Amino acid sequence: MIRFECDYAEGAHPKILEALVKSNFEQTPGYGEDIYCDRARIAIKKACGDMSVDVHFLVGGTQTNTTVISSILRPYQGVLCAETGHINVHETGAIEATGHKVLALQSGNGKITSNQVRKAMKEHLADSGPEHCVQPGMVYISNPTENGTIYSKQDLIELYSVCKDLKLPLFIDGARLGYGLAATGNDLTLEELTKLCDVFYIGGTKVGALFGEAVVISNENLKKDFRYMIKRHGGLLAKGRLLGIQFLALFEEGLYFEISKHAISMADKIQKAFRDKGVIFLYDSPSNQQFPILENKSLEILEKKYAFAYWQSVDSEHSAVRFCTSWATKIEDVEKLVSDIITS
Amino acid sequence: MIRFECDYAEGAHPKILEALVKSNFEQTPGYGEDIYCDRARIAIKKACGDMSVDVHFLVGGTQTNTTVISSILRPYQGVLCAETGHINVHETGAIEATGHKVLALQSGNGKITSNQVRKAMKEHLADSGPEHCVQPGMVYISNPTENGTIYSKQDLIELYSVCKDLKLPLFIDGARLGYGLAATGNDLTLEELTKLCDVFYIGGTKVGALFGEAVVISNENLKKDFRYMIKRHGGLLAKGRLLGIQFLALFEEGLYFEISKHAISMADKIQKAFRDKGVIFLYDSPSNQQFPILENKSLEILEKKYAFAYWQSVDSEHSAVRFCTSWATKIEDVEKLVSDIITS
Amino acid sequence: MIRFECDYAEGAHPKILEALVKSNFEQTPGYGEDIYCDRARIAIKKACGDMSVDVHFLVGGTQTNTTVISSILRPYQGVLCAETGHINVHETGAIEATGHKVLALQSGNGKITSNQVRKAMKEHLADSGPEHCVQPGMVYISNPTENGTIYSKQDLIELYSVCKDLKLPLFIDGARLGYGLAATGNDLTLEELTKLCDVFYIGGTKVGALFGEAVVISNENLKKDFRYMIKRHGGLLAKGRLLGIQFLALFEEGLYFEISKHAISMADKIQKAFRDKGVIFLYDSPSNQQFPILENKSLEILEKKYAFAYWQSVDSEHSAVRFCTSWATKIEDVEKLVSDIITS
Amino acid sequence: MIRFECDYAEGAHPKILEALVKSNFEQTPGYGEDIYCDRARIAIKKACGDMSVDVHFLVGGTQTNTTVISSILRPYQGVLCAETGHINVHETGAIEATGHKVLALQSGNGKITSNQVRKAMKEHLADSGPEHCVQPGMVYISNPTENGTIYSKQDLIELYSVCKDLKLPLFIDGARLGYGLAATGNDLTLEELTKLCDVFYIGGTKVGALFGEAVVISNENLKKDFRYMIKRHGGLLAKGRLLGIQFLALFEEGLYFEISKHAISMADKIQKAFRDKGVIFLYDSPSNQQFPILENKSLEILEKKYAFAYWQSVDSEHSAVRFCTSWATKIEDVEKLVSDIITS
């Protein structure tokens, strides 16, 4: 079985494993206060083009979303996000577990607009008794989104401008950030993204690491006592250096960007093969997740050799599915798939 | 600097690293539903002598304590534990973050007794309006405790008997369980411990793994939907197999027990060196943590070569400190320390 | 200004005030353990036709919803309800404050159907990894709904049957229950309703009392330790007898039902006046809340003499508004309004 | 049975009932936005000598404590208080329900000192990894305390000075504030107390009202969005005017202070009678709660005619009990008790 159902099916990039093996018997302090974390923080600050940001390492995405969001909101506030946002549908209520409502906005493709945010806040304030309702307190987006779509520079400039107007911190979930930045047509750099939000994270789990997400906080008001927040949510890894070692390997010499490009080139090949066959896509995704709408009988054939994710029924004879590539996707596997698409 | 200040200063046992490297490019499903986790679960069940228990893998201790405790308690219940218990003092309120009070019981050495539990419940029920107070809903102990002390088989038989009487599930934090089972004078086996509580965990982070804690649930009532609880607390690792691979390496052929013995033998040497010099210990610890009470001026000399943890002031001239050994402690490092103790 | 904007604009029914004054200097135990609460509980049990139910008195609706819902759900579960449900839109996240997601179902008129509940559960279980999503754990409905609509006996039989099938406790918010039971066309009795759910409450605040909601628990599994839950949510009134005295006055001789009928007869008059003028209604409400769609210019005239609630814009020239009657609505006020409607 | 076991055994002061009856059929907006609440807020601001404070009305003490405390603390912070503090022992974990640990300080008489607060903060910061522990985020005291003791002006000046130094907001639970201000030997005025803390509340439930607590916020930083907090905790009473009417009656012409004095004069009589018999008291209370230590056989006699609260066992033959007076205590009842004490 060749697996395209997710972007976390393999371990880590060999350079990361090598670094873990090499450092294995060194003795370091725990909880992220070691030399590797220090060096990784510097490498990430450089990559973000801002040495004044704070960088923290956490283990996984749900934990990171929960920690960041609950560090920002006042108790009576909620977080605006797309109805398809990960925090709204795939985290078993981890945000609600911290006492906050997810304020879902309609979204066809996983993105939300500055107008939607402005409207939500306006409607809240127009209520005769706004204190009877959850107050929007921040905005959460993913880039790329759960649907593979990406925010353009202009999208983000407009969204962040509204957020600043309304005093709503903007948080970008970058679980697949590398694939968004490498996506075909993307016009946003990591430096620009750093300036266009208050806090975001750089996903490692799906982009080369065994695990790990690097939170980057640029808004001065959100920096204080963040380590307390991490600990309270069970996210302060005892052997914190494991995160430092991995992110150092990814960011010291640009490995993160390089392996992200590979995933996109693999996704592009798959997309092209489907398009050449006249297949329609559920979302217009330029990143590492592709959502072709296929005949159910074609799916039956493909699933004998390939693992992919069922997404949704489109009509009685067609379904949308998801094919994911990653840093680890082998070109020969993609070639096999492409060949099977062509001859199908 | 030679480090004895904690038991998580190094990476992982070489056999674990080897297994991670070897499996690195295999493709597996995520979230603990892979073949390595399956095999590790079976290996642990065998080691526990009970194939009917449920086994789940989480990343860290605070996360595990929070997930287990909040899965057991009703909203108005609290957890009885020693005042020195990890959940009471060193988790930044992670238990309270789930809405539950930690009901601390006095403890000189980190342990609590069956009588204390019985008394706490009796006092609660004797209140004229018990519903105005937090109801004790479970008991949490650590074995070994944060002070290095261990529960004897008889201790645990009595405690668990009271717990069953009072319908209070008993949860054992085994972050250092290997070192407790290998401790000099311990008369408890893993099989017996499995029978003498409702749920416990086997710590990997401090005993050979990069990270990871294996929760073992024997009480049938506590098994349902536990994966939802893990996910809600951000503890469901995407590349779950990393946990399976590590625990498989630790339990397939008894590595866990073997490396635990090494830590104890190292701790015994340190203890003996101090005792031979007439040093008194703060707690009577037979496990991998040793708490000698030293003259402050001796500490100044030792801390030039060795890292250890300051514990508490004893009088104006003496302080208690903690020396930890682990699976990774090198005999030559211990020999240097012993030699320095002897000549001090 | 004559007020029709809500059903809590006045104090209490005179019989209630009289009972409060009469008992004022009696000394009783606190927290609901007095003779008045005892007698009120019996009166309510009789009215429900089931002496085995548990009856508890709380002060307000949000508090009651929060207490009941958080007493039922496991941490990873959410509550299914209409998107317009009070707990979803008008309680400032009080449910989320207890860690639970509100799982909103589409609803045109405030009601939800048994099919929607079945579908929601089916979809949850069909997910490849249901533990990544909030598990539906109970169903919340209001009767009458926030839109004035009511559940028929058949509606409730079907809904409760599905709930029992799926092991989802059914909770009915009866903040306006009296007005629902008295509504024109209602075919449900209090006895029947008691049998067709697991727990519900009888609203006092909007139906004759100064304040107070009487929770009726028929499901045996939900009874245990409910007073702890009330106290934890700050709902255990020190002078609990105030609630007993009020509910005793309301239920000892059927006052609750009698005054509810008055409110409906007042609402019917208003509804008829509007209908006779050809006015369309936003919802088909047979209870004490009426939602006529009026020309904006008519509203400008009406609002000089009457207070009513703005509900929503319908088109550029029309808006829906809400007129509420209550136990306290004066017939002369209604007659004035009707006359103004006729001549408008 | 003559009841001295608590200070909430009766209804309300007749002037309050009268005001409720008189206003009963007036129509007002809900949720505290009526003319009575407006007037009561002004009356309280005047009594506090500061027209810039914010005043909010809530129903009960536990609700008020929870709402205020959770509005102040950051998620990882806890509240310092006496181990005997109401929030620590008698609120069924309502504070923990909002995610915060109660950081209990030893206390013999219910009070805590500025030194204890300073020491707690110092110890927290001295920890090698403070982020592993709950950060003290505010200070809670009761005046009078649960033991009847009161803070002198000097006590409060010192405590508040330390709190300001350490940036820890000081919150005073004034559930029995009237009785503290009227206590024999009290040297603190309401105006002074307003200046010596960041937020406090004036208890109505125990001092003349049917129910109700008036929160007074002087710290500008704590004022924002407090109504959202009240609503989220289920404390926004629909018929909010009931609270306004009551506090207006209590504060318009000084009734609150007058009836408090009555309670103290009744308590003094009881205290004197016991002292004259040579009885020792558990606490040195100058307020409306008296804690004599009596022979168990005397208690058996007294409890035939009087209700009082059992407090704690002192030795095998003696127990401490609590006698409470209130605004409603009848002089003839006190005289009976005094006579029975004398002749006992």
Image: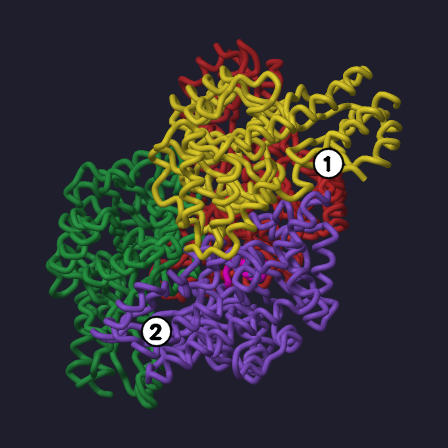
Chain colours: A red, B green, C yellow, D purple
**Which chain is home to disc 1?**
C
Q: Going by the image, does D238 lie left or right of C120? A: right
The answer to which image quadrant residue B320 occupies is bottom left
Q: Is residue A60 above or below residue A82?
A: below
Q: Is residue D75 magenta?
A: yes
| Residue located at (77% from left, 50% from top) | A165
Magenta region: which residues?
D69-77
Please identify the quadrant where the N terminus of chain B is shown: bottom left
x, y percent for residue D322? 38, 69
The amino acid sitting under disc 2 is Asp
User: Which mark is drawn over residue D330?
Assistant: none
Residue position marked by numbered label 1 in the rendering: C5
Q: Is residue A204 visible?
A: no
User: Which mark is drawn over residue D340?
Assistant: 2
Kindly report the distance in space between the C-alpha atoms of the residues bearing marks 1 and 2. Answer: 58 Å
x, y percent for residue C181? 55, 24
Q: Nearer the viewer, residue B208 or B187?
A: B187
Q: Nearer the viewer, residue B97 or A300?
A: B97
x, y percent for residue D249? 66, 61
Q: Nearer the viewer, residue A328 or D343?
A: D343
